[in-house]
């Protein structure tokens, strides 16, 4: 029996253009983003480097960039939070049937953009019993330790928890740990279809 719902944020609730930032950046790196820069992105998502240093490292490598332009590029992937998804989440919260948790790989610049550009963000955040952002807790998906952290922090069981994410590598790790999962295909499915799926037992 499912007692807990663990949701991703971007691609599940927030609209994303996943390739936008990557495509912009690779133009500055001769069509291929260096491994050390990719590793820097992962460190930033885990809060291992602060925003000023993160921006500085990019500007140091790419003379054509300035701070404002880089931030614009970094946030290019982010989109709106559709109201029908928010209303679905609010109804789910009102039902009181589940503990509702969020687990997102994200960073300070992205969250700052969301707070400034998504008017309903406070409503959205208030629907969750716990709101875990990778840069605040020092872990990131698909590593197992981030899932183990959530289980321990909330004293919940993996087999009583449904994890919903749009990234298959994250789903694979969760499955190995015993979570029930839904790999949401954002091009063909919507989170509001959660209770319509035959393969998701709630």
Image (cartoon, rainbow, N blue to C red):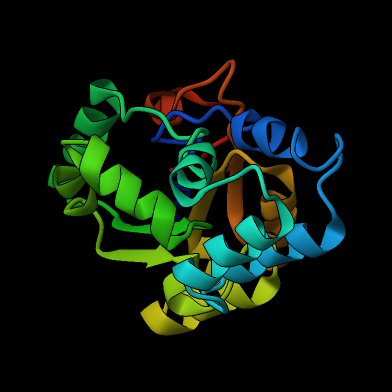
Give the total number of marks visible in the rendering: 0
Quadrant position of the C terminus in the picture: top left
| Rendered view: 153 above or below 97 | below
Snapshot quadrant of residue 58: bottom right
- Whether residue 19 is visible here, answered yes or no, is yes
Q: Quadrant of the N terminus?
A: bottom left
Residue plotted at (25% across, 56% down) = 128
Q: Tell me if I can see residue 147 in this picture.
A: no
Q: Quadrant location of residue 32?
A: top right
What percent of the width, then of the height, locates residue 112? Answer: 31, 53
**Could you tell whether 20 is left or right of 153 in the image?**
right
Question: Where residue 155 appears, x then y in whole percent?
Answer: 41, 82
Q: Position of residue 143 (x, y in %)?
A: 70, 69
Name the residue at the front extreme: 63
**Above or below 41: residue 76:** above
- Residue at screen point 68% across, 68% down: 177
Q: Position of residue 201 (x, y in %)?
A: 50, 40
User: Up-down: is 12 above or below 65?
Assistant: above
Kindly indicate the quadrant of the structure image that contains residue 30.
top right
Which of 20/14 is in front? 20
Front residue of 160/30: it is: 30
Q: Residue at x 31, y 44 (%)?
A: 114
> Which residue corresponds to the image point at 60% horizontal and 60% vertical from the top-left?
179
Farthest residue, direction top:
188
Between residue 155 and residue 59, name the one nearer to us: 59
């Amino acid at each position: 029996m499912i007692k807990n719902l663990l949701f991703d944020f971007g691609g599940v609730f927030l609209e994303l253009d996943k390739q936008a930032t990557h495509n912009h950046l690779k133009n500055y790196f001769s069509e291929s983003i260096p491994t050390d820069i990719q590793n820097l992105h992962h460190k930033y998502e885990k809060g291992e480097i602060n925003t000023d240093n993160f921006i500085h490292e990019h500007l140091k490598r790419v003379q054509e960039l300035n701070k404002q332009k880089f931030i614009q590029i970094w946030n290019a992937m982010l989109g709106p939070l559709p109201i029908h998804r928010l209303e679905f989440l609010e109804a789910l919260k009102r039902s009181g049937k589940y503990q509702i948790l969020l687990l997102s790989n994200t960073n300070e610049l992205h969250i700052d953009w969301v707070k400034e550009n998504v008017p309903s963000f406070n409503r959205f955040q208030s629907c969750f019993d716990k709101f875990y952002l990778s840069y605040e807790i020092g872990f990131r998906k698909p590593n197992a330790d981030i899932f183990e952290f959530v289980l321990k922090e909330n004293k919940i069981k993996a087999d009583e928890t449904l994890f919903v994410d749009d990234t298959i590598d994250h789903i694979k790790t969760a499955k190995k740990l015993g979570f029930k999962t839904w790999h949401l295909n954002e091009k063909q499915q919507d989170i509001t279809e959660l209770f319509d799926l035959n393969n998701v037992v709630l």
